[in-house]
Image: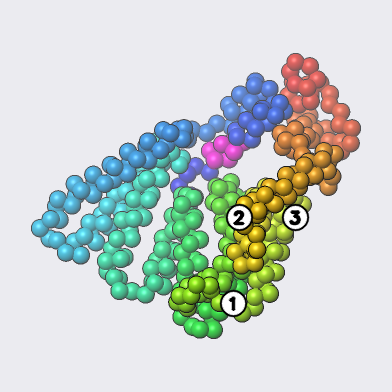
């Protein structure tokens, strides 16, 4: 599907952001950063976060006033059909305004375009719920999935990406809960689908969908873990079977979910360190904490105060030990800040691209030059 935003400007924006990070790490001079911004221009309107929030609120209010105004012409007609027709008119008007502002005002996730997109999606949902009031959940899931997918493909919006993810898993759950056997296999189906999504987008390097891919990766990792978490499966099983008991009953395949609850966080942490993937590592730590809560909920014999004391001692001891162990870099992992190490050899790449010199892996040596001398003189 054709993208709504200028792809060339998005690429230039990425280059500008990278140059800003390099400048913060003293790999570029202010003059070189300014030269990069001149050679790779982008004209998007991107206000600050507070202005963006204000514009979003203002645009939302404006959309509400617009619906109220055009509803005056439908007062006499009344009924569900008239309201559905009104919503479709509003949806079309919002989309036309959105496309116009993106093209002529150069908006790029600036608040106004986000509000218009959400207003258009909401207006599109209204006739769906009115005309198919008693439809099965599957119908709503399919419609939502199609609508959110189209919006994501064109506008690369984060909320529509989350909507796609949620609609897909709701559709899966709705299908499997219709049959007793598939209900028992729901946790495994959720894990398989989450893993499939993650591996299908893991190597996607599209700049246009970069943020959407990050969100999908994080959601897939979290969902994969929750699908195999013992606490979620056990309590979810009691909820689905309407078992109103003080303590939820034991589930089938309990040892399997014990294993998942322990192994998945460990795998996330190890893989995150090995691949230098911060998102994977952080999610691993969070899921590890939830695993501790899971086992505490069913097996702990200590009081809360005792648990907090033990947890604090273990965490402090682990943190100190890891910092001391990684003070000397091991396995390409160090306790130093990212800015001090991550881009250590980028100067060699810059030299190779601008001066035609091959980068050296060990003992990097840089010559002079006006734009790639590795700091040899006042002109870098």
Q: What x and y, as percent, mark residue 364?
A: 86, 31
Q: What SS does tag 2 mark?
A: helix
Q: Is residue 14 magenta?
A: yes
**Magenta-colored segment: predominant secondary structure:** helix
Q: Nearer the viewer, residue 106 or 325?
A: 325
Left or right: residue 331 versus residue 102 is right
* Residue 233 in the image: above or below residue 265: below
Q: What x and y, as percent, mark residue 148?
A: 44, 58
**Nearer-N-terminus badge (2/3):** 3
Circle 1 packing at 10 Å, graded few (<14), some (14-19), many (20+), is: few
Residue 112 appears in which quarter of the rendering? top left
Left or right: residue 91 versus residue 346 is left
Residue 4 visible from this viewpoint: yes
The residue that disc 3 covers is 270
The residue that disc 1 covers is 250
Q: Are marks 1 and 3 in contact (CB under 8 Å)?
A: no
Circle 3 packing at 10 Å, graded few (<14), some (14-19), many (20+), is: some
Give the Cα distance between marks 1 and 3.
30 Å
Q: What SS does tag 1 mark?
A: loop
Give the Cα distance between marks 2 and 3.
29 Å
Left or right: residue 91 versus residue 168 is left
Residue at 55% x, 31% y is 41
Residue 218 appears in which quarter of the rendering? bottom right
Residue at 72% x, 37% y is 338
- Front tag of 1 and 3: 1
What residue span does the magenta drawing correspond to? 8-15
Left or right: residue 253 versus residue 346 is left
Q: Nearer the viewer, residue 278 or 11?
A: 278
Image quadrant containing the C terminus: top right
Residue at 56% x, 52% y is 215
The residue that disc 2 covers is 304
């Amino acid at each position: 599907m054709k993208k709504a935003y200028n792809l060339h400007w998005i690429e230039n924006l990425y280059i500008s952001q990278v140059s800003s990070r390099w400048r913060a790490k003293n790999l570029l001079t202010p003059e070189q950063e300014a030269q990069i911004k001149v050679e790779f221009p982008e004209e998007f309107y991107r206000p600050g976060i507070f202005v963006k929030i204000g514009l979003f609120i203002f645009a939302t209010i404006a959309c509400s006033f617009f619906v109220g105004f055009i509803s005056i012409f439908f007062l006499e007609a009344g009924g569900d059909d008239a309201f559905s027709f009104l919503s479709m008119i509003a949806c079309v008007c919002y989309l036309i305004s959105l496309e116009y502002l993106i093209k002529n005002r150069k908006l790029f996730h600036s608040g106004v375009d986000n509000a218009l997109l959400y207003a258009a999606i909401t207006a599109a949902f209204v006739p769906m719920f009115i005309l198919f009031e008693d439809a099965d959940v599957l119908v709503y899931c399919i419609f939502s999935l199609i609508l959110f997918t189209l919006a994501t493909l064109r506008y690369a919006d984060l909320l529509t990406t989350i909507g796609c993810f949620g609609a897909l898993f709701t559709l899966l759950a709705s299908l499997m809960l219709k049959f007793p056997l598939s209900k028992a296999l729901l946790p495994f189906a959720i894990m398989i689908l989450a893993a499939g999504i993650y591996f299908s987008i893991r190597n996607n390097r599209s700049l246009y969908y970069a943020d959407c891919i990050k969100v999908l990766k994080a959601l897939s990792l979290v969902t994969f873990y929750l699908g195999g978490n013992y606490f979620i499966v056990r309590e979810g099983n009691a909820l689905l079977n309407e078992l109103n008991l003080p303590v939820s009953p034991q589930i089938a395949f309990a040892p399997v979910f014990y294993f998942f609850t322990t192994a998945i966080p460990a795998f996330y942490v190890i893989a995150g360190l090995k691949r230098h993937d911060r998102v994977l590592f952080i999610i691993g730590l969070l899921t590890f904490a939830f695993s501790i809560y899971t086992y505490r909920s069913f097996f702990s014999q200590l009081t809360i105060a005792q648990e907090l004391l033990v947890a604090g001692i273990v965490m402090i001891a682990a943190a100190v030990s890891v910092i001391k162990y990684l003070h000397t870099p091991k396995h390409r992992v160090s306790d130093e800040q990212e800015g001090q190490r991550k881009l250590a050899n980028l100067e060699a790449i810059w030299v190779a691209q601008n001066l035609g010199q091959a980068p050296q892996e060990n003992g990097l040596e840089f010559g002079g030059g006006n734009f790639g001398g590795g700091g040899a003189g006042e002109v870098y």
